[in-house]
Image: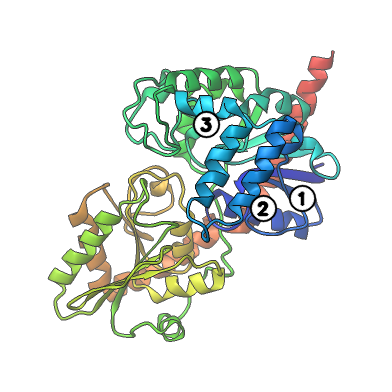
Amino acid sequence: MVNCVCQVNTQNGAGGAAGICRSLHQEFLHRGLASYMLVGKQKETDASTFLIDHDSYRSAWGRCWMTAAKKVSAFSGRIRGAQRFGEQIFPYIADFRRWLDYQQGREDFNFPGTENILQMIPGRPDILHLHNLHANYFDLRALPDLSKSCTTVLTMHDLWTLTGHCAHPFDCLKWRSGCGECPDLKSPPAAIKDATRHNWERKKSIFAESRLYLAAPSQWVMDKIDSSMVRPAVALSRLIPNGVDTGTFSAGSMAESRAQLGLPVNAKIIMFAANGISNSRFRDFKMMREVVRRLSHRMQGEKLLFLAIGEAAPTEIKGAEEIRHVPYVKDASLLAKYYRAADVYIHAALADVFPTVVLEALASGTPVVATAVGGIPEQIVNGSTGFLTPAGDVESMTNAVIKIFTDKPLRCLISDNASEYAKLHFSRQRMINEYLSFYEEAVEDWKINNGELAE
């Protein structure tokens, strides 16, 4: 019986892995479980969320400089260079090994509190649920001991775990055989020198000594795991698609949503949402801008509004074409109104695992046109809940959007299908129930395995 769960992630808050963590955490608490979160960065205050304590395990020298780093970081945005000193320079002074690893291109695992995270929450967890482990806060070398001390579940939100440095290898297949001679060191998390072979080999040795219960949001990710050096560590695995709150993200009146948001009633509205739109290595914003340009050219006489949500930038108007940037929308109810106000949601990705925004759009009854990369084809039923197009194929995406714009009965049918399909396959409740079921199975297996080891 699972009574206590501790989740670990880069940060808490909304969006991506953090959003999945929060959904699980809140529902666990609602169901009466003891639930805690341990994070590298605390974005939101929560009595049951704790910042992972590394400073207590550093030397006096290290603690001194890390204290200075936190004080300097507090002036980020007010004093030029404060963020860089607080997050990069001072931590390297505090721990010379981190600076040395960075200079050599080695992934930074110098976080001494990691092996003690089970002592950082009240009580003893039945489940240690790990999410994103990169972004400089977790020592992956602690995995073998942690997995021997507690039933350890790992959800693969990206592919960093099985590569020599990057979260998405795109078309590169070197992660299968050992990386090295990396074709793209700038792909996040970026490296300044090619130590990808070393990083890969180190991860391989870590996973060879670990025993994990692995969850993946898409079969696409699961297939990658089966071909990777992570596979020997997997005791049990489960495909658990991400879920969204289908009570908040649900179909509703387009006209009413537009009126509430102050959007034009008669315009054709396209929407896209992401955190940091224009600079993302994984989202093809240039392609989406070109789609809008072609739509404007081919649908002359129609007012066209492209809502780019997730980044503050000046509005661009050219004839009947408008690109309006909307800063990140934290409030889920408000974001749902934007989805309902749109005629179509477009998602031009170069790499993606299982984007939550696609699920939110579908649940809101908004037809989705997206590139068929990563796990996205597992989210959309082509021609029924939206349309899939090849990555980089501007003309295909343009044609699909025009089809939705000009065929009202088709749009209504796709809208209804999308909302019902999301309720059935991508609800938050379904996701949580599947995780709880997997937890029970994992705990039982872990106890049996540890009993055998003890004998």
Alpha carbon of mark 2 to alpha carbon of mark 1: how far? 9 Å
The quarter holding residue 244 reads bottom right
Secondary structure of residue under mark 3: helix
Secondary structure of residue under mark 1: strand
- Vertical comparison of 304 with 207: above or below: below
Q: Position of residue 210 (x, y in %)?
A: 65, 22
- Image quadrant containing the N terminus: top right
Say what amino acid the circle numbered 2 marks: Leu
Nearer to us in this view, 258 or 281: 281
State if disc 1 and disc 3 touch (CB < 8 Å): no
| Residue under numbered circle 1 | 35
State if disc 1 and disc 2 touch (CB < 8 Å): yes
Alpha carbon of mark 3 to alpha carbon of mark 1: how far? 25 Å
The residue positioned 59% from the left and 27% from the top of the image is: 96
Q: Counting residues from the N terminus, which is met first, the one under dot 2 or under dot 1?
A: 2
- Image quadrant containing the C terminus: top right
| Residue under numbered circle 3 | 161
